[in-house]
Structures are given as structure tokens and as C-alpha cells.
Amino acid sequence: MFAVHLMAFYFTKLKEDQIKKVDRFLYHMRLSDETLLDVVARFQAEMQKGLGKDTNPTASVKMLPTFVRAIPDGSENGEFLSLDLGGSKFRVLKVQVSEEGKRNVQMESQFYPTPNEIIRGNGTELFEYVADCLADFMKTKELMQKKLPLGLTFSFPCKQTKLEEGVLLSWTKKFKARGVQGTDVVSSLTNAMRKHKDLDVDILALVNDTVGTMMTCAYDDPYCEVGVIIGTGTNACYMEDMSNIELVEGDEGRMCINTEWGAFGDDGALEDIRTEFDRELDLGSLNPGKQLFEKMISGLYLGELVRLILLKMAKAGLLFGGEKSSALHIKGKIETRHVAAMEKYKEGLANTREILTDLGLEPSEADCVAVQHVCTIVSFRSANLCAAALAAILTRLRENKKLARLRTTVGMDGTLYKIHPQYPKRLHKVVRKLVPNCDVRFLLSESGSTKGAAMVTAVASRVQAQRKQIDKVLALFRLTREQLVGVRDKMRVELEYGLKRDTHPLATVKMLPTYVCGMPDGTEKGKFLALDLGGTNFRVLLVKIRSGRRSVRMYNKIFAIPLEIMQGTGEELFDHIVQCIADFLDYMGLKGAQLPLGFTFSFPCRQAGIDKGTLIEWTKGFKATDCEGEDVVDMLREAIKRRNEFDLDIVAVVNDTVGTMMTCGYEDRNCEVGLIAGTGSNMCYMEEMRNIELVEGDEGKMCINTEWGGFGDNGCLDDIRTQYDKEVDEGSLNPGKQRYEKMTSGMYLGEIVRQILIDLTKQGLLFRGQISERLRTRGIFETKFLSQIESDRLALLQVRRILQQLGLDSTCEDSIVVKEVCGAVSQRAAELYGAGLAAVVEKRREDQGFEHLKITVGVDGTLYKLHPHFSRILQETVKELAPRCDVTFMLSEDGSGKGAALITAVAKRLQQARREN
Ligand code: BG6
Ligand code: BG6
Ligand code: GLC
Ligand code: GLC
């Protein structure tokens, strides 16, 4: 009995002595609570640094956005392939996520070896190997004929700009394949898979193992918002508020951040904690100076740390009687599984003896106790450090949510955490001590990270399907070159039809003679009034032309024309116009002055002379009664008479295209085309008199107002018109009319956009499927808003703000789609304009028998002026479709009022000459 007591006493004493000895030796590895709290604070600062746009480039903890935006909600389903590469084992899996609601996942998997020559060889060969394994798996499981989406768990730091792409920042752990760093691993694997002709796999998601783990656990516990790996390597991810992630546009919701905490300390932040053993281990590693935090914690390194310590202690005569075995000198001889075995509660001591003996040592009882304690200190430090970093993440989550107490779940995985007998307990305890205001549940991911990766892939595949639907709609607006050539050629036919006497009555492009026969020659002079009606603004102008100098002075005032007047009676409209003239004359101090007047009237008029214009029909937003079929000059004269306050000499009525051509022609004599891309769409040009069968005479040229807005009214554009164009047409003031205009001009582009958005919303692809009152409102997307939305300088948040100002409550995702829709619609408009214009300049070139034509086009209109891409696309298209014409575009800065005044001046001069004869 006494002997037993003596033995026990002896052993306790021995144990105490050994522990004290080791404690003393490894004093530096034992971290106090104070130190741990300090590490928490340091890691908090690191996270902040990694998240900041300006600070990220120099941050060692990279805080990588993962583009995983939500945890599973149970609606995921489908069949997926999965690869799990980068942990201690490489696996290929098939994951079946069952029908909605049941949360049932079935997996079949196969492990494949990862020999060193593959993971440290050539990058291309590594990916080929992975593709071979995948092909083998699919053959064994008879999946070859199926097209399955694949989620790739790739457990290395990758910079992602979207879910299905990731540039490897650096290899960590045991991998070091050449030529992969800095390249996108998804495309590398995709390329490698191409070698297998019978493999049809789409990689939809790239996820880090921490993310896979978090998602796996979140599938079972919706509180899970953190994923931690303590395995070969160590790392964590968590859900961060988008508003804190400066590297990704958008501020609503959350996104998972892969912290890559393994690199904590790479900038020297942990030097005071690192020991000589850490430094030695680092020097002998594949990536010296990198992953310093990981090297104090994870499975790949713990055994080696123990070995280095034992070696040093043996050298110092503190162990094995100063004897060192040769095995103890060999790197990697002690592995983490040995550490775990030595720390086992009951068999630990026996295991220790066995392991040391296997290393060729002859340990005493005291040695075994001491070695066991070394293991404890090393693995305890590991758990402490992990706990500190995790505590920082939990604190951040709690603060983000502005909660006094946080209830949360952490998904856990990794062999060290799983096989080490004390590790989980220690970790949990320290975390709870460091963040007493968090109720943390630790949930072990039993099935690895693949289930989670499949969830991410499921969401990605749903998004991809939606994307396809959106692309299908937008594809309707993408015209091929052949289609554009077709439009150009049809336009050419219509131009000829309109000019010919026989075909003119039925022509949809009306080709109206304007009786404007020449360009100003610089001798024009005098003071003129001008009206400019039919564009965005109604203006009254006073234009003073000085002869010889080609200089013009203008004064103008914008007046509103209320909707009820635009769509009231003709008398009301013209009375209103005269009222505005009266106000203007008053304002200019010209009351009673009898000035010649040029009337820019931007609607189709059949002219029998320069001062006669019968309105054929209203277009755009006008619909005043009793005007169609009437001479608008007469209507204006009568209104002036009705007012009986002043008299005006109405000399010319001019379409805005003609006014624009004249304005520009005053400066550039080559200007023989006038183009409007504004509220409406139209073009005029100088045509040979001999081609104009409706007007007598063959000499010289006359300007033709094409009224090309009516192009397509005979159905000749039906092959490219979409359902949305038809809806816009049906909702307009003039259904069936001006079909080309309705596909191209500012008044309608926004409406087309609106129709598409309504349809996408109905399909559940936008605005959460909710069609708001606002979206039902006509005319909300004015040209200026389209132009703003499409501006390249605008960040996503600004686009969203514009949409919000328009009353459309959109997410950032919605904003991206809206911007794309606007882009598709305006691009088509610009291309159609280009095709139309190409037809005209080609006609002019051929008519004059030139090999090459140099011509200037005067342009005006808010679409052309405000839209960020319209003018460029228009010009490029003309170049493409009329390659033998050298077209210069000249923006009309002064509007068409100036041109109208010039035309008036010329007409006045001719009038005078006629009178004098
Ligand atoms: C596995 C996961 O369970 O754990 C892997 O499926 C992960 O994705 C691995 O990389 C991490 O642990 P270890 O110990 O294998 O590196
Ligand atoms: C103006 C012209 O500059 O542009 C008008 O003076 C023309 O005559 C107008 O109608 C066309 O553009 P919008 O965008 O105002 O219809
Ligand atoms: C390494 C990798 C990291 C991974 C971790 C756990 O730290 O860099 O991406 O999550 O190991 O496998
Ligand atoms: C409409 C009018 C046309 C005008 C054009 C641009 O198409 O019918 O006359 O030139 O709009 O304002």
C-alpha cells in the first residue's frame, strides 16, 4: 500500500518537475489572456485594413470578397458535381440536393491521391490531372452523358471578381505548382477539361473551403455565418455587410468574406509573439515569410514545431539524456496526428513512448511526460490564437448588427480540429472567455465543404438560368451586320419610292420637297424672328444676321406648351404660339415691329412653296385637332389676325432637319444633310432636281425632308421589330405610324426600356417580381435619364440612386440589368440611324458618280447630344455600311432657329428680287 502511495507521489512529483521544466523552456509560447486580447484587437485592425479600398493593397490579411451573398434558404435543388482540392484529401463528388423544402442531400464521392510531383510540378499538368480524375469519376458513376454544373472548392487564396472566376494570389500549404499564381484557376481547369471531348461540365462557382464549410453548416443551421478551418491550413470566412466591403460595388445585403487569416503577421504584426521555433520552421517551409499565423496554428506545421522544440531540448540536455536520434533531425518526422495521439487522455503517455521509440529514441518516463507537455503547449497555443482571431470576427459581426448580445453559429472543419482530442474543447472555452457577449454554437461539418459548395453552385445555376432569360430578351435588340445591311438597302428603296411620281402616293418615307434650293452664301443680312416648334422646347428667337462676316447674333426665350394645348384644338395651339410671340416681342422691346419670320415646324408638311406647308399628320407628342390637312402658315397668320396686336411677315416654314442643315451649312459648305436624333427622328438632304419627280425642273438641287420616321410603316421592318416595339407603338398617339422613329428616337427609347423592364419583372427577373405603379407610368425614362444611366463614369450605386429618384426601388443587381437594357435599346437605335444615314450618303455618292464622297452631316437633338455612346455608335455604323463615304458630323450648336432665319433671309432676298423685276 505504502509502495503504491510512494509510486504515486513519485510520479506526481516527476510530472510536476517535467511540466515546470517545459513551462520554463517554452515560456514564450504560453499566451496570457492579456496577450490574447491584444491579438484580438490587432486582428480587428487587420480586418478593417483588408476591407478598405485604399488600405487593402498593403494589407496582409486580404479579406477576399467571395461573391457568395446569402446562406442557403432551402430552395436549392438539382444535381451537381463538386471538386474539393487543397485540404489533406482531394475528392470528386456528385451532390444531389433534393426538391424544395426537404433539405435532403445525397453525396457520392471518390478520393484521389495528390502526389507531390503533381502538386509541385507544372500547373498545366496539375489541372490536367484534376480533369482526368473528374473524367474518371464521371465514367465510374456513369455521368458522362449528363451536363452538370460544377462547384470547385479550391482552398487557396483567390481574388475573385465574380463567383465563377478566381485568380490565385499565392500557393499555401503543400502546393507549389508552377505557372498558376496570378492566373484564373477556373479557366485553367476549364481548358484542361476540354481535352476530354466527352466531358460537358460548366464550372459555375469557385469557393474556398471555409466558405464551403460555412454553407454546409448553414444548410442545417440558419444562424451559421462563420466558417473556420483548422486542418492542413487554417482560415476563416464570415458574412460581412456589403456597405463595409469597399472593393465590391453595392451596399445592400451581405457578402461572405474569405479572411485568409493564415497570412496574419506577414507584415510583422506578430513578431513579439513568434518564437525562435516559428522562425526556424518558416525558413524550412515552401513559402518562407508567408502565412506566419497559419504556421503557428495549423496541422501541417504543429508536428514540425514539436520536433524542432524536442531537438533543441535534447541538444540542451533537457531530454533523452542529451541524446538525439537521427530521425529527430528529419523534417516532417513528427506529424500532427502524432501530436494528437500523444495528447490522448488515457493512452497519451503510452502513445508518446511508442512514437518516440519509433523515432529511434529511448525515452525515460520523465521524457515522455515532458514531450507530452510540449505537445500540449504547442497545440494549446494554436487553439488560443485561433480563438483570438475568431473572437475578433464575432465581435465584428455583433457590432455590424448593433447588438448587445450575439447569437451565432460557427461552422467548423479540418483534421486538427476533428482528430485532436482536446482541441475543440479548448478552442470553445477560450472563445467564450474572449467574447462573453456572444452565444456561440460550434457546428462540425460532418460532410466536408462540398455540400455547401453545391448550395453555392445551385444558387449560381439559378442565377445563370435567369441570366439566360435576360440575354434572350436583349438578343432581340442585337442586330447582325446582315440585318443592318438589310435595313440600309430597304431604306434606299424607300427613298427612291418617295421621289418617284408613281410610287410616291403609297411611299412611307414621304420625301417632301422643301423648296430650299441653295445654301446661304454669306450675303444674307437683317433681323429676323424665328419660331422653333416640335422639339423638346418651344422657342421664339430674334436672329440678327450680319452680311459678309458669317456671324449671327441670337436672342431666344423658351416657352412651355402645356400638354392640354398640344393635344387640344388647333386654334388654341396657334393662339398660344402667338401669345408667346407677343410676350417675346414685349420682352425684347420690339412691340409693333414688323419683322420677317421663319417658322421651324418639326412635323411632316407638304409644301407647295417655301411659305406654304400643309400638315400631313401630327407626330411625336402633338395631337391638336383641326390641323391635319391645313396650311400651318395660314393657321399662324389667322391666329395673328385674331390677336390683332401686331403683324408679321411669315416668309418660310422649315422642318427642323432643314433648319439644322442650314445652321451647319452656314459654316461648312459641304453640309448637305441635316439629321435630328431627338424627341423625334428625321433626316433631310440635298437631292438633284432631276430625281425629284414631284417638282418641275431638272436644274440644280433641292432639299428633301425625307420624314424617314415613317420607314417601316408598310411592314418592311417587321423582321426586326420586337414585341416591345409593338407595345410602345400601340400605346402611342399614332399607332401603326412612324415605326422607325419609334425604334430610334428619344421619345420612345425610354418607353421600349420600360416595356422590357415590365416583361422582365413579370418573369420574376427584376424588382423582386413586383411591378410598381411607377413602372406602369408612361414616359418616366426621358432621354436625359437614359443618358445618365448609361454613363460609364457612373458607379453602380449612382445608377441605383437615379432609379430611386425615378421612383424605382431597385437593388444593385436590378440596376445592372436596367443599365444593360438601356444599353441594348440605345445601341440598336444608334445602329438603325447609322444604317439609314448610310443609305442616303451612298445614294448621294452614286448619283454624283463619285468613287468617294466627302460630305458633312449637320446634327441636332438631345439623344445625339446627351447620350454617352449614341453618336459614336452611329458614326461607326455609317463608316461600316458606307465605307466609300467620308462623313463628317457637325453638331448644330445653335439649334435650327438660326438656319430658319437664314432660309428666311434668302427667301426674302429672292422675294425682293422678284418684286423688283
Ligand atoms: C474537408 C473539406 O473536410 O476539410 C475540405 O471538405 C477542407 O474542403 C478540409 O479543405 C480542411 O481540412 P484538412 O485537414 O483536410 O486540411
Ligand atoms: C433643337 C432644334 O436644337 O433640336 C429644334 O432647335 C429641334 O428645331 C430639336 O427640333 C430636336 O431635338 P429635341 O431633342 O429637342 O427633339
Ligand atoms: C490555407 C489557404 C486557405 C484555406 C486554408 C484551409 O490557409 O490559404 O485558402 O482556406 O488553408 O484549408
Ligand atoms: C418627327 C417629325 C419630323 C421631325 C422629327 C424630328 O419625325 O415628323 O418632321 O423632323 O420628328 O424633330
Image (cartoon, rainbow, N blue to C red):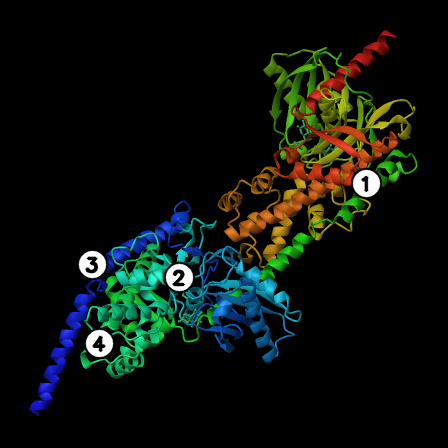
Q: Mark 4 highlights which residue?
A: 320
Residue 320 located left or right of residue 903: left
Q: Check disc 2 and give the amino acid type.
A: Cys
Query: In the image, which is nearer the foreground, mark 3 or mark 4?
Result: 4
Label 2 lies in ligand 3 vicinity (Cβ under 8 Å): yes
Q: Residues within 10 Å of mark 2 (few under 14, many from 20)?
A: many
Q: Position of residue 368 (x, y in %)?
A: 22, 78
Residue 313 image position (x, y, % from top left): 22, 69
320, above or below 166, in the image = below
Quadrant hosting residue 553: top right
Residue drawn at point x = 68 percent, y = 37 percent: 621
Q: Residue at x 70, y 26 (%)?
A: 574
The reply to whether the residue tagged 4 has its Cβ within 8 angstroms of ligand 1 is no
Q: Nearer the viewer, residue 256 or 560?
A: 256
- Which image quarter holds the C terminus? top right
Along the viewing direction, whichever of 267 and 354 lies nearer the viewer: 354
Q: Position of residue 698 (x, y in %)?
A: 92, 24
CA gap, disc 3 to disc 4?
A: 35 Å
Viewer-side label of 2, 1: 2
Q: Amino acid at mark 1?
A: Met
Using the image, tell me which numbered label, if any, was put on residue 237: 2
Disc 3 marks a residue whose amino acid type is Glu
Residue assigned mark 3 = 34
Kindly identify which numbered label has been placed on residue 186.
none
* Cα–Cα span, label 2 and label 3: 25 Å
State left or right for residue 433 relative to residue 495: left
What whole-number distance in Å separates the C-alpha atoms at marks 1 and 3? 82 Å
Mark 1 — residue?
491
- Determine whether the residue tagged by mark 4 lies in a helix, strand or loop: helix
